[in-house]
Image: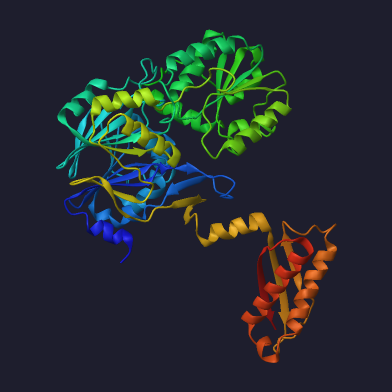
Amino acid sequence: MNQTTVAVENVGDELLFVPLGGAGEIGMNFSLYGCRGRWLAVDLGIAFGDETTPGIDILAPDPEFAVACRDRLDGLVITHAHEDHIGAVAHLWPQLRCPVYGTPFAAAILTRKLDEVGLTSEVPLHEVASSDKVQIGAFGIEYIRAAHSIPEAHVIAIHTPHGAVVHATDWKLDPDPLIGSETDGAALKRLGDEGVIAMCCDSTNAGVPGHSRSEGALRKSLTEFIGDCEQRVAVACFSSNVARIETIIAAAEANGRNVCLVGRSLWRMVEAARATGHLDEDLRILTEHDVGYLSPDQTVLAVTGSQGEAQAALTRIAFGAHPNVHLDPGDTVIFSSRQIPGNEKSIGWVQNQLSRAGIEVITEDDHFVHVSGHPHQDELTRMYDWIRPGILVPIHGELLHMNDHADHAEDHGIPEVVVGENGSVIRLAPGPAEIVDHVHSGRLAIDGSRLIPIDGEVMRARRRILFGGAAVATVVVDGRGRLMADPQLTAQGLIDDQGDAASHQAALAAIADAIEKLSDRDRKNDDIISETARIAVRRSLRDTMGKRPATQVHVVRL
């Protein structure tokens, strides 16, 4: 019996927390709470591929454990509409098939995603008003407003027979958030007064002293900075950061400039924000097709691509591949975002290309052009004072961030702190909080229209090809296994037709020689011929080029 089955069947009266994504990493948030045989999922997000995932732009959490719980899964609660919390729903819901709950803005974004894959009529999507309470199977859910960089972010209170658990991912204490409400301190204090047994809490900036800066202060800074620019300005941000989009619009208007949105995901987010009343319908926003008709000193571009994504608008602009937008020497690009760990190379690649073209690149290291949507240490301390949890479980961060959070919580008197990465089964009650089991967790690659394991054979082969190239040989033999023609070899990513003729010929000779040395008996077996030729190719290319490519051999017997 595997670990997943054991964990599912042994829930009993315990209250369990099982992170399957977002614990030990930034992104791909997916958590389960289990109590008395029933389960509740919170968020289902994506992460982004990098150079270790060739051909893959999007990753999703492996839902194997949740699928094993499916007949006892009461629902999926969405805290807010950021991609790392909502982006995998359309890909993985067919395996879960449970009701989904979210507030109007999250529901609007999710509906658009479900439309794209034809699932709108299948998914039972329930809208819940901000600050509302709803019973989802065995769990009482309370939505508590939180300031963040997107409308309708929420801290979730989960009421169980053992008591309340607070799931506090993606929040900050911003007195002037501009879009959305301030974090509802009164509701959180009330929860603390009623008693909270555990809090699972954001760790992104747990190692950063002080208090995060306000979106309101950023708007003033960005307005002043754009006012000092003489030519075209482009501002790169996350498309889901609606507060930042409104800030860009306001800063442009204050300087007598027009705003053009460049990137489909920006338009999707703006449409959803308008439909739910978070952006004014009367805001004047132009499209990328209007850019060429505007004077550079009258233009601000809001663009996607702050993380150096290969197909995003800013990357295509930087390399002169965008059909409608180009930047000139003397223009300015502002990166109004943080670098997600793992994206440093791709971001630097784009920034260097922009600099090479004579474009000024501004980041948060140069000027006040970005604020985080996550709490710093002083905000965490205030949250502890409001909630007064008996147990603190750090989530939403790499292991370094979660350990920083654990240290901070212990320094401020939280009685029990448990650090668990993806797959940890953490018992919250009854008895002492501790990791009691581990279940399968992992990543799936969204490869076109299919999901494949990130550590499966397809991705392993793709990595081998990426780093070592690929060789395909064909040998034609007669009934006795004698070569009837010279072997053929194609070595993509290895052999240049002009400069590597000697290596090519050496490999062909090695194939012929190896087959000729086989016994009469072995020549009658196609598998033996194929493996013999494969080894010969790899050895030859290793000797002549220092490479061991992924190699296949096709045997044709006439």
The quadrant of the picture occupied by the C terminus is bottom right
Q: Residue at x 67, y 58 (%)?
A: 468
| Label tally | 0
Image quadrant assignment for residue 181? top left
| Residue 358 at x, y percent in the picture | 73, 23
211 to 230, vertically: above or below: below
Residue 295, horizontal then vertical, whole percent: 66, 14
Residue 112 visible (yes or no): no
Given residues 85 and 5, the one toward you in this image is 5
Tell me: residue 259, above or below residue 519: above
Q: Answer yes or no: is residue 167 visible.
A: yes
- Residue 473 on image: x %, y %: 71, 70
Nearest to the observer: residue 427 or residue 416: 416
User: Please, which colouring scheme is shown?
Assistant: rainbow
Which quadrant of the figure contains the N terminus? bottom left
- At a point 25% along the width and 45% down the height, the residue shown is 433
Q: Position of residue 475 (x, y in %)?
A: 72, 76
The answer to whether 263 appears left or right of 215 in the picture is right
- Seen at 74% across and 79% down, the residue is 514
- Identify the image quadrant of residue 5: bottom left
On screen, residue 188 versus residue 22, left or right, reads left
Q: Is residue 212 left or right of residue 495?
A: left
Drawn side of residue 403 relative to residue 431, left or right: right
Q: Which residue is depicted at the point 66% across and 73% down?
A: 554
Q: Nearer the viewer, residue 118 or 262?
A: 262
* Residue 240 sits above or below residue 19 on the image: above
Nearest to the observer: residue 159 or residue 365: 365
